Amino acid sequence: MEKDMDIVEVLRHSRHDWLNRLQLIKGNLDLNRIDRARAVIDEIVIETQNEAKLSNLHLPMFASLLLKSNWENPSFKLEYEVLQDSKSLQINDVLLTNWTFLFFSCLHEAIEPFQESHLLITIDPQSKGIRFIFDFSGIIIKSKLIEKFLANQLDSLDLVIKEFSESELALDVFMPNMA
């Protein structure tokens, strides 16, 4: 995987994102679009709550990958939702992070560049492990690359392809707690 960002670079990206959000709120207020300004604030609150839940999963490498993804990987917009907090997970953070990084890289290579692409990851901590639903929408131009990646999966992951077409990929991935 790539070199970790240093703290100054992370703060620079974060500051840039926050300034963009504040300008969006201010612009909507200046145009007297109070409802839109409130909607932007609500979106920020939900995103921040998901960031906190992600951090509370005690998967620091995985959390770092997701938190930095939109800064480092402009080929698709990543969003994630953590359904609940869980403090009892015993997941292999390195394995999970490496698999997700490789999946992101494969997706980057397989999709049409400079098109609007979106990946939503739903994270569902459960008593026996953690379930991930990867829901991608965009233009897939190299489906064989994705097929090859998905065919070579680790035994420690339970992966089910829910949908796979030229414009959508939906995966259900379950990673059990470590023994």
Image: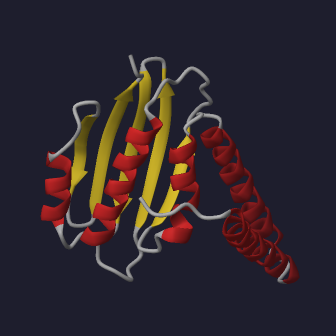
Res 139 seen here: no
Res 96 seen here: yes
Residue at figure coordinates x 37%, y 59% from the top left: 104
Residue 8 sits in quarter: bottom right
Can you give x and y, in whole percent of width and height, for residue 6 in the image?
65, 64
Q: Please state if 98 lies on the left or on the right of 8 as rendered.
A: left
Residue 112 sits in quarter: bottom left
Residue at figure coordinates x 12%, y 63% from the top left: 144
Classify the position of the C terminus by image quarter: top left
Q: How is the image coloured?
A: secondary structure
Can you give x and y, in whole percent of width and height, for residue 59 in the image?
55, 38
Can you give x and y, in whole percent of width and height, for residue 5 in the image?
60, 64
Can you give x and y, in whole percent of width and height, for residue 68 in the image?
56, 61
Residue at figure coordinates x 38%, y 40% from the top left: 95
Answer above or below: position of 92 versus 23.
above
Q: Please state if 102 lies on the left or on the right of 154 as rendered.
A: right
Q: How many marks?
A: 0
Residue 139 sits in quarter: bottom left
Classify the position of the N terminus by image quarter: bottom left
Residue at figure coordinates x 41%, y 73% from the top left: 75
